[in-house]
Image (cartoon, rainbow, N blue to C red):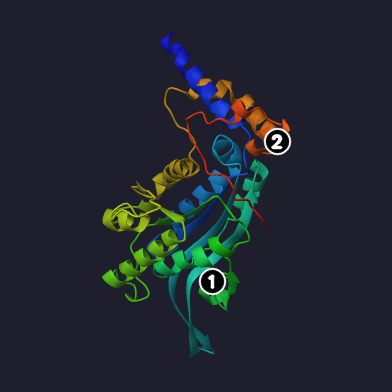
Amino acid sequence: MHIRTLPVLAAATILGTLCRPANADTLELALVIDGSSSIAPADWTLQIGAYQSIFQDAFYTNFIAPSPWDDIVVGAFVFSGGTITITSGGVPIGTETFAVASHLAWTHIDSDEDAFAFGAGFAGLPQPGGQTNTSAALSVAMNGGEVGCINPAICNVSPKSTRPGLLDNGFTGDKLVIDISTDGVPTLPNGAGTPNAADRALAIAAANAARASGITINAIGVGNLDATFLAALVGTDPAAEPAGFFLTAGNFNEFEAALREKVGRETMVPVTPALPLALTAFGAVFAWCRRRRAEHTSCADTSAGHYPASACASSGLMVLAHGATRSS
């Protein structure tokens, strides 16, 4: 066999995997985005622009179509934290606290058009400022909870409402992921803006609670962020299950590249240097395979003659557990 035929054969193996019937495997992804005051306004624009760009740049074609997933459900939570003094006629009349400032509603994406519409929600999203309440953000992303404040004009956040998290959003995915991006360590609710061990412990406890519910935690740390904290947050040191991963970006100019790499890993898009030309040549076949998979039911129907049993055999590339379905 001539060595240059290997990429073509590898591409054919991947295509064979994609053309096998699927069982509507769904990935659920909660994007948890740091909006605290430690992020400069220009950097906030770069961060939010990166999320908008990735979803509006053929997201389904780039990340979901070539992956093991049939579709994705995604929502976003902007977090920071703080206490706002409410005044009337210049006289303080009360205070209000918030942790999660705003939320982009859970959206089912199975086309580039769906992804583009979701990405539009990031355009002009206000930065709340304030401190960093990581534990509260993780808890709301998992279980749902209060978002915003009563007077959004004062808080620079969304009007107060209760929004669902991964566990109560009306979908039942095959894999649940919380994806947090941050430039700092927790400073609330105990530190009043100062990093401290108690708030770090609360954030790690919230991540452990998510893992106990089967949720994977992944992260992007921007700048000189403590890698020890990130490793504990995603469950790699000390080791925990399901283990996640973290990436770092030196600054927010590098953030979009790191985000694209992270989403590629989360969706498990195969990236092999030897394959780009072969995969490009088969691009049209990828789309055809996706349509064919949608036309059939599942490998469980081999007895009815829909598929030969041999077509349902694993290629050895990846075996997914089937059975969960999506509801809305």
303 over 275 or under it: above or below: below
| Distance between the alpha carbons at the discs numbered 1 and 2 | 39 Å
322 over 190 or under it: above or below: above
Look at the image and tell me whether residue 133 can be seen.
Answer: no
Q: Indicate the amino acid at tag 2.
A: His
Expressed as whole percent of the image width and height from the top left, the position of residue 236 reads 32, 51
Q: Nearer the viewer, residue 216 or 309?
A: 309
Look at the image and tell me whether residue 297 can be seen.
Answer: yes
Expressed as whole percent of the image width and height from the top left, the position of residue 288 reads 67, 28
Direction from residue 238 to residue 139 in the image, left or right: right
Q: Indicate the amino acid at tag 1.
A: Gly
Whether tag 1 and tag 2 are in contact, CB under 8 A, the answer is no
Q: Nearer the viewer, residue 199 or 17?
A: 17
User: Residue under circle 1?
Assistant: 145
The local secondary structure at tag 2 comes to: loop
Q: Nearer the viewer, residue 89 or 263?
A: 263
Q: Nearer the viewer, residue 273 or 129?
A: 273
The local secondary structure at tag 1 comes to: strand
User: Residue under circle 2?
Assistant: 296
